[in-house]
Image (spheres, grey):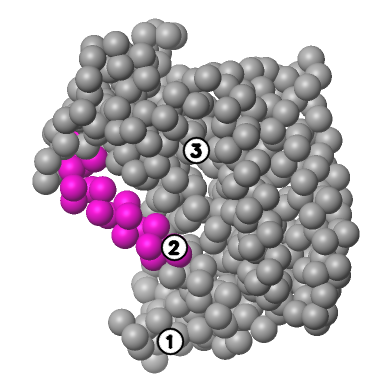
């Protein structure tokens, strides 16, 4: 295993393979977890899955295109992408905007809905990485080198997202910003001050909505733990989703009840195909299936980390660090909420939860990193050598040989038999 990880193309194959596997599992589990509610709402079991499949059909080609885009393009696109993200977030507060579960963070167009805050994550990664890479030589000596530029830009995005009452995305944005600064080499005193301000802000914002504060209080006091659930009112009012999520995991056992066999998705578990899809994975695929999903995320994290270690470009290093915080941060918060380790704050599970804009932006971000992995030292030569081996292997396959021989301008190989 150590020898395989030492290969210059290890990061490329780890990120590519885990992304493809998680996307496929996500499509299967969205279909399974949403089929009952889809039929109940539209008389069509495939309505939610169909939308997710359309977004996947959009995101996969965009991700492939992102793998082929040179690094200089991302650097030049940094400021335009930030501008587009700000405009998209402002559209939420126009007639195109719509509200869901008390959060105004969606826009609707042509029968489709999109969440601009997801695109803001990608824009912040690319923009902040470009700015920090240019200022990296002075980061260790002066905080003033980054505060006048990076913080105002990031706070504009955070402010617009908070106006829509989306605390979960705000927390991911702040964690993403901290990771970008950490990888860039910002001084430690900046994290002490910034962390204190961010923590105070999150506490203050949490108290602006009673439903949000109730979830946090229930988690802090252990109200929703099965052994301390005091009254039926607690169970029905604020603990329903948490309790049923854990019941789904518990009922899955070692090997699960079978794909499609979930009982909790029959209108018992809210957001079964979205924020709580991991609970359905645990119920239908059991502990074994849950560990496979966790293992794939671990492999994805290892691949991303290898890109950070091996690249020589500061922009690539910082941007990949931001993607790590974005994707794996959401994984930890989402699965932690399902397990009851953190409060339920409405963060989707990357590549698995239903949600087209989240799927597309995550695929593009990972496609960008796959492109970075193709350029780490030694990777271009190794990939070219493997491609040559594949071409030579195909050349000896009879069907391939005959097709090549039939092409105009391609001479048939001599067999030596007259």
The residue lying toward the viewer, choosing from 125 and 27, is 125
Which picture quadrant has residue 340? Answer: top left
- How far apart in space, not on screen, are marks 2 and 3 (Cα)? 19 Å
90 to 94, vertically: above or below? below
Pointer 1 and pointer 2: residues touching (CB < 8 Å)?
Answer: no
- The residue tagged with tag 3: helix, strand or loop? loop
- How far apart in space, not on screen, are marks 1 and 2 (Cα)? 16 Å
Q: Where does residue 65 sit, x and y in percent of width and height?
A: 66, 56
Q: Residue at x 31, y 60 (%)?
A: 295
**Which label sits on residue 347?**
3
- How far apart in space, not on screen, are marks 1 and 3 (Cα)? 34 Å
Q: Nearer the viewer, mark 1 or mark 3?
A: 3
The residue lying toward the viewer, choosing from 26 and 383, is 26
Could you tell me if residue 205 is visible in this image? Answer: yes
Specify which label sits upstream in the sequence, 1 or 3.
1
Q: Which residue is mark 2?
A: 300
162 to 16, vertically: above or below? above
Q: Residue at x 45, y 64 (%)?
A: 301
- The residue tagged with tag 1: helix, strand or loop? loop
Q: Which residue is mark 1?
A: 6
303 to 151, vertically: above or below? below
Residue 286 falls inside the magenta stretch: yes
Which picture quadrant has residue 300? Answer: bottom left
Q: Which residues are drawn in magenta?
A: 282-301
């Amino acid at each position: 295993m150590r020898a395989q990880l030492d290969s210059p193309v290890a990061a490329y194959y780890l990120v590519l393979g885990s992304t493809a596997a998680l996307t496929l599992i996500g499509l299967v589990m969205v279909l399974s977890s949403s089929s009952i509610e889809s039929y109940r709402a539209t008389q069509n079991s495939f309505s939610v899955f169909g939308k997710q499949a359309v977004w996947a059909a959009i995101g996969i080609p965009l991700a492939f295109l992102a793998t082929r885009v040179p690094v200089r393009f991302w650097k030049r696109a940094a400021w335009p992408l930030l501008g587009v993200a700000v405009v998209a977030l402002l559209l939420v507060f126009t007639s195109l905007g719509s509200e869901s579960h008390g959060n105004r963070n969606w826009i609707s167009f042509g029968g489709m809905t999109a969440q601009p805050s997801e695109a803001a994550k990608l824009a912040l990664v690319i923009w902040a990485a470009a700015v920090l890479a240019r200022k990296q030589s002075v980061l260790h000596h002066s905080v003033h080198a980054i505060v006048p530029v990076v913080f105002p830009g990031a706070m504009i995005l955070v402010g617009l997202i908070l106006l829509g009452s989306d605390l979960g995305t705000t927390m991911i944005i702040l964690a993403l910003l901290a990771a970008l600064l950490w990888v860039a080499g910002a001084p430690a005193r900046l994290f002490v001050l910034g962390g204190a301000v961010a923590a105070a802000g999150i506490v203050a914002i949490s108290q602006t909505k009673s439903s949000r504060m109730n979830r946090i209080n229930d988690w802090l006091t252990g109200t929703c733990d099965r052994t301390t659930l005091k009254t039926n009112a607690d169970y029905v009012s604020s603990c329903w989703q948490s309790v049923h999520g854990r019941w789904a995991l518990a009922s899955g056992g070692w090997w699960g009840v079978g794909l499609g066999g979930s009982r909790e998705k029959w209108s018992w578990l809210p957001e079964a195909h979205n924020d709580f899809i991991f609970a359905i994975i645990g119920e239908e695929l059991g502990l074994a299936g849950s560990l496979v999903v966790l293992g794939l995320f671990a492999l994805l994290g290892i691949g991303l980390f290898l890109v950070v270690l091996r690249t020589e470009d500061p922009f690539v290093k910082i941007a990949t660090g931001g993607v790590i915080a974005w994707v794996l941060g959401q994984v930890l918060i989402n699965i932690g909420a399902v397990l009851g380790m953190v409060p339920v704050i409405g963060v989707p599970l990357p590549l698995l939860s239903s949600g087209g804009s989240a799927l597309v932006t995550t695929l593009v971000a990972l496609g960008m990193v796959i492109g970075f992995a193709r350029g780490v030292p030694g990777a271009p030569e190794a990939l070219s050598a493997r491609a040559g081996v594949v071409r030579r292997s195909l050349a000896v396959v009879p069907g391939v040989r005959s097709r090549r021989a039939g092409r105009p301008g391609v001479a048939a190989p001599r067999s030596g038999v007259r």
